[in-house]
Amino acid sequence: MTEYRVAVTLRRRLDEKEVGQMHANRSASVSEYEMEDEDVVVVTLHAPNALTATETAEIQVQRATGVEIAATQLVP
C-alpha cells in the first residue's frame, strides 16, 4: 500500500481533550497525526489509493474527535 498525507480541515479548532482522543483512537492504517494549525490535522496513512486515503482520514478524525469536517485535501 502507498503512504499518503491528507490535510483534514475542521469546522472548529480542537481542544486538548479532542487532540488526545484522536491520538489514543488511532487506527492501524494511520501512521501519524500532526496538528498543522488549530483546525487542521495532517494524517499520514497507508491506503490502496488516494480516494480511500482521504475517506479514511476523514472518518478517523471525525470519529475520534466528534468535530465536523470542513474540507479534505491530499498533501504532496
Image (spheres, grey):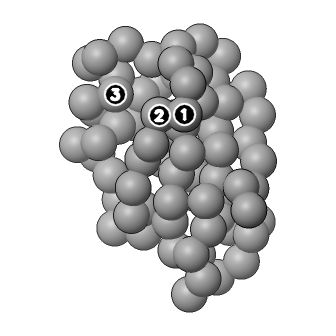
Indicate left or right for 28 with 59 as reference.
Answer: left
Disc number placed over residue 35 in the picture, else none = 2
Please identify the quadrant where the C terminus is shown. bottom right
Residue occupied by mark 3 = 19
Disc number placed over residue 20 in the picture, else none = none
Label 3 sits on a secondary structure element that is helix
Q: Residue at x 56, y 87 (%)?
A: 1
Residue occupied by mark 1 = 36
Q: Residue at x 39, y 64 (%)?
A: 31
Coordinates of residue 57 in the picture (x, y in percent): 57, 51
Q: CA distance from mark 1 to mark 2?
A: 4 Å
Q: CA distance from mark 3 to mark 2?
A: 9 Å
Mark 3 or 2, closer to the camera: 2
Of mark 3 and mark 1, the one earlier in the sequence is 3
Badges 1 and 2: C-beta atoms under 8 Å apart?
yes
Does 22 sit above or below residue 6? above
Indicate left or right for 47 with 50 as reference.
Answer: left
Coordinates of residue 56 in the picture (x, y in percent): 58, 57
Q: Is residue 17 visible?
A: yes
Other residues around mark 3 within 10 Å, as few (<14) / some (14–19) / many (≥20): some
Of mark 3 and mark 2, the one earlier in the sequence is 3
Label 1 sits on a secondary structure element that is strand
Label 3 is placed on what type of residue? Val
Badges 3 and 2: C-beta atoms under 8 Å apart?
yes
Coordinates of residue 9 in the picture (x, y in percent): 67, 30
Label 1 is placed on what type of residue? Glu
Q: Quadrant of residue 52?
A: bottom right
Does 58 sit above or below residue 20? below
Other residues around mark 2 within 10 Å, as few (<14) / some (14–19) / many (≥20): some
Label 2 sits on a secondary structure element that is strand
